[in-house]
Image (cartoon, grey):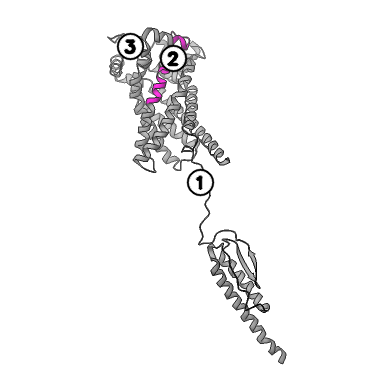
Amino acid sequence: MGAPQGRAPARGGQWAAGRGGAARGAAGAGRGGGGGGGGAMELGAGAGAGAGPGARGGAESGRVLLLLMGGGGGAGRARRGGAETEVAPGPGPGPGGPEPRSPPAPDYEALPQGAAVSTHMLAGAVAGVMEHCVMYPIDCVKTRMQSLQPEPAARYRNVLEALWRIARTEGVWRPMRGLNITATGAGPAHALYFACYEKLKKTLSDVIHAGGNSHVANGAAGCVATLLHDAAMNPAEVVKQRMQMYNSPYQHVMDCVRAVWHNEGAGAFYRSYTTQLTMNIPFQAIHFMTYEFLQEQLNPHRQYNPGSHVVSGACAGAVAAAATTPLDVCKTLLNTQESLALSSNISGHITGMANAFRTVYQVGGVTAYFRGVQARVIFQMPSTAIAWSVYEFFKYILTKRQEERRAGK
């Protein structure tokens, strides 16, 4: 009975030593920084070098407590019996520590450094050529349906009937005549168009609504971009529409260019420029404002989303096309100088928007201003959908490649 009683105090001492070691371990954890840690952390190993198993147990208890309190925020040190050992870092930051930040994903809506405006110019050129090439047959029908006094053989009820009759009576490739000059003009025109729009949109948005999107800035940027687009595209439009007309005397683009230059002078290529601007400035203002508004609704985070680009582009094109059809009818008249309409015009040549408006009214009345509205809307909906989806796709690809090249350096 005496021996067991003698050992009891020893156990009590070991328990006390262990308890003291755990307390000192907790204090060491506090010095080490606890939850966000990463500094050196010390654990007391007991009361002196002669501590028994109880002291070692206290050190282990303190070490466990330290790991629980440290939250794995960083590597620490445990001192056992005077020797330091490394404590492995935990799985992640503790509740009080800062969250790790992942690098931001490249924003394809903004130009990457080093890409300059070439990204928008290249994407815009591809989009413009694709848009005009794919929809060119419908454009041919639109031009003919806007004729004020068409020949009996060139009177069509709808777009499909027009395409069928043109292909059957004039040849399968007749609706494509003039495509080459259109593609030649569309490339540089749309390159200037989209590059100017993107640059001005960002600049004006920062001035009007810093850090946000401004519909006024979008509309203003679209109007200024139209000035450059039409300056590059107007001569091609004149040649294209003359070749699209029924019984056109021109078989080749250069035949038309030489005839216009020789008979009417160089000014004939820009005769409809003011009317084109009068039509396209409101068209593009409505177009861009509608597109950006729909993007805010369908794609608020402005990520690359082909579906939202197609829907937004198609709806924006349809609204803008229907609203500006009267101006487009006048532009077509100025470009083609339609012979039957000229007979009702005293001056012999139709020049200027006011003259064109008067002539349209004299020949066909109020309804003449909306000739070809069906073909125009049908043409513009897929045209703008194609243009925006191709443009956003190429902008996304080019921007992504620029970011990858920068990251690889």
Residue underneath mark 1:
104
Kind of element beneath mark 1: loop
Left/right placement of residue 72 relative to residue 110 reads: right
Q: Which label number is shown at residue 244?
A: 2
Write the residue at 63% across / 78% down.
48
Neighbour class for label 3 at 10 Å: few (<14), some, many (≥20)?
many
Q: 397 and 13: which one is in front?
A: 13
Q: Which residue is mark 3?
A: 341
Q: Main secondary structure of the magenta part?
A: helix
Task: Write the residue at 32% across / 20% down.
Answer: 367
Badge 2, how many Cα within 10 Å: few under 14, some, many 20+? many
Relative to 83, is 214 on the left or the right? left
Q: Quadrant of the C terminus?
A: top right
Q: Secondary structure at mark 3?
A: helix
Q: Residue 14 sits in which quadrant? A: bottom right
Return the disc, 3 or 1, that comes first in the chain's sequence. Answer: 1
Q: CA distance from mark 1 to mark 2?
A: 51 Å
Indicate the quadrant where residue 73 lies.
bottom right
Amino acid, disc 2: Gln
Is residue 247 magenta-colored?
A: yes
Give the mark nearer the N terminus: 3 vs 2: 2
Q: Amino acid at mark 3?
A: Ala
SS at mark 2?
helix
The region drawn magenta spans 227-256
Please state which amino acid type lies under the numbered disc 1: Pro
